[in-house]
């Protein structure tokens, strides 16, 4: 089929797992995706879907997450002492 790509090809293009692409197709997040047997056919010009959900109600965003630089300096301080 010209103009269509398999889930494996789109997973490489979008830098996600094949299973994630299959779930996006199954849940209707990828427009015009069709399943033929056990293979998903996705239009080649389809952009990667963006996340449309946010936090669950009542959840607060995480704050003060450690940065890689902070972790490195923490371990460097231990080495010098």
Image (cartoon, rainbow, N blue to C red):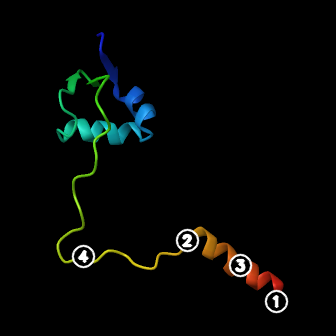
Residues packed near mark 1 inside 10 Å, few (<14), some (14 to 19) or many (20 plus): few
Residue in front for this viewpoint, 35 or 45: 45
Rounded to the nearest whole Å, what is the CA distance between mark 4 and mark 2? 22 Å
In contact (CB < 8 Å): disc 2 and disc 1: no
Q: Which residue is mark 4?
A: 59
Specify which label sits upstream in the sequence, 1 or 4: 4
Looking at the image, residue 8 sits to the left or right of residue 24; the answer is right
Q: Which residue is mark 2?
A: 67
Rounded to the nearest whole Å, what is the CA distance between mark 2 and mark 1? 22 Å
The spot of residue 59 in percent (x, y) is 24, 76
Residue beneath the point at 30% across and 36% down: 22
Nearer the observer: mark 3 or 2; the answer is 2
Q: Secondary structure at mark 3?
A: helix
Specify which label sits upstream in the sequence, 3 or 2: 2
Residue in front for this viewpoint, 68 or 22: 68
The spot of residue 81 in percent (x, y) is 82, 89
Q: Which residue is mark 1?
A: 81
Q: Secondary structure at mark 4?
A: loop
Nearer the observer: mark 4 or 2; the answer is 2
Looking at the image, residue 38 sits to the left or right of residue 77; the answer is left
């Amino acid at each position: 089929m010209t103009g269509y790509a398999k889930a494996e090809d789109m997973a490489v293009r979008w830098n996600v797992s094949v299973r994630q692409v299959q779930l996006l197709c199954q849940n209707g997040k990828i427009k015009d995706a069709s399943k033929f047997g056990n293979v998903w056919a996705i239009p080649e010009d389809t952009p990667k879907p963006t996340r449309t959900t946010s936090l669950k109600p009542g959840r607060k965003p995480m704050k003060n997450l450690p940065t890689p630089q902070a972790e490195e300096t923490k371990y460097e301080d231990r080495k010098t002492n």
